Image (cartoon, grey):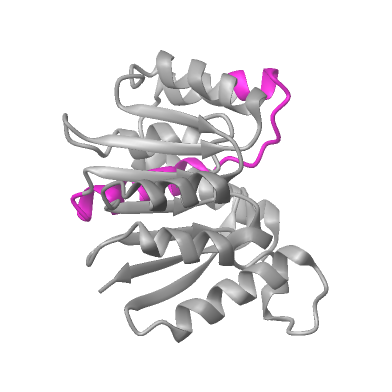
Amino acid sequence: MNEQQWTAMDEYLCDRTQTPDEALEAALKASTQAGLPAISVAPNQGKLLQMLARMSGARRILELGTLGGYSTIWLARALPVDGTLLTLEAVEHHADVARGNIERAGLSGVVSVIVGDAVDTLEAFVRDGIPPFDFIFLDADKQSYPAYLRLVLRLSRAGTVIVADNVVRQGRVEDADSIDPDVIGVRRFFDMLAADAHVSSTAIQTVGTKGWDGFSVSIVS
């Protein structure tokens, strides 16, 4: 098997499980035109996130790593009419593009894009005692995953679902001797999950248009 075959299979699966969506397609196009990196989740991954959020009954969603708002749109559409989504983005330009995409999708009343360092923002949330989130999606810089996990667990409740993207990194995460900061961050993230008796986790590898990577899925008890 090779990446060409993975991509062809992804295209087939998306063709059979999804319908054309103007807002999502426009979000990808606008992100490309604005020079954002092409690292949004694949369409079938976006729909998986949406379905997981719906199955969990999420009313409050937190996303770390907005980029152009593609995954944000998928997740926001899982919410009930009174639901809310907060998405954190470090780069102002990315946030501006995302706001335009979110507005075009008719979700400005549901989604708030917060610009700044995610650790600082999460620490402020903890200090302010904001209500816990029902569903949390981590898709920001991987070396900070341990810091993010430490804080989002304090913003969770029993039943909160935490999904983290890019946790396989073409198999490099298996290498205990790696000096790659992203690999080190993901390995520490997994160590923290394994050591926490109040979190039940699993992880799956994925192949497709995004290459070889994977998700972790955790439930807080």
Which residues fall within the magenta stretch? 30-57
Towards the viewer: 92 or 154: 154
Would residue 171 be seen by someone viewing this image from the given angle?
no
Q: Quadrant of the C terminus?
A: bottom left
Towards the viewer: 204 or 83: 83
Q: Which residue is at a point 56% across and 72% down the rendered structure image?
A: 189
Q: Quadrant of residue 211?
A: bottom right
Q: Is residue 134 above or below residue 14?
A: below
Image position of 138 (left or right of 6) = left
Query: Residue 38 at x, y = what percent?
Result: 67, 36
Towards the viewer: 93 or 32: 93
Query: Residue 59 at x, y = what percent?
Result: 21, 43
Query: Residue 186 at x, y = what percent?
Result: 62, 69
Image position of 173 (left or right of 103) = right
Q: Is residue 164 above or below residue 14?
A: below
Q: Which residue is at a point 53% across and 59% down the rendered structure image?
A: 148
Would residue 63 be seen by someone viewing this image from the given angle?
yes
Query: Residue 125 at x, y = what percent?
Result: 40, 47
Q: What type of secondary structure mainly makes up the magenta span? A: helix
Q: Which residue is at a point 71% across and 72% down the rendered structure image?
A: 184
Q: Is residue 43 magenta?
A: yes
Q: Is residue 152 above or below residue 47?
A: below
Give the farthest residue toward the front: 127
Image position of 76 (left or right of 215) = left
Q: Is residue 132 magenta?
A: no
Q: Quadrant of residue 217?
A: bottom left
Q: Quadrant of the N terminus?
A: bottom right
Q: Which residue is at a point 66% across and 23% down the rendered structure image?
A: 93
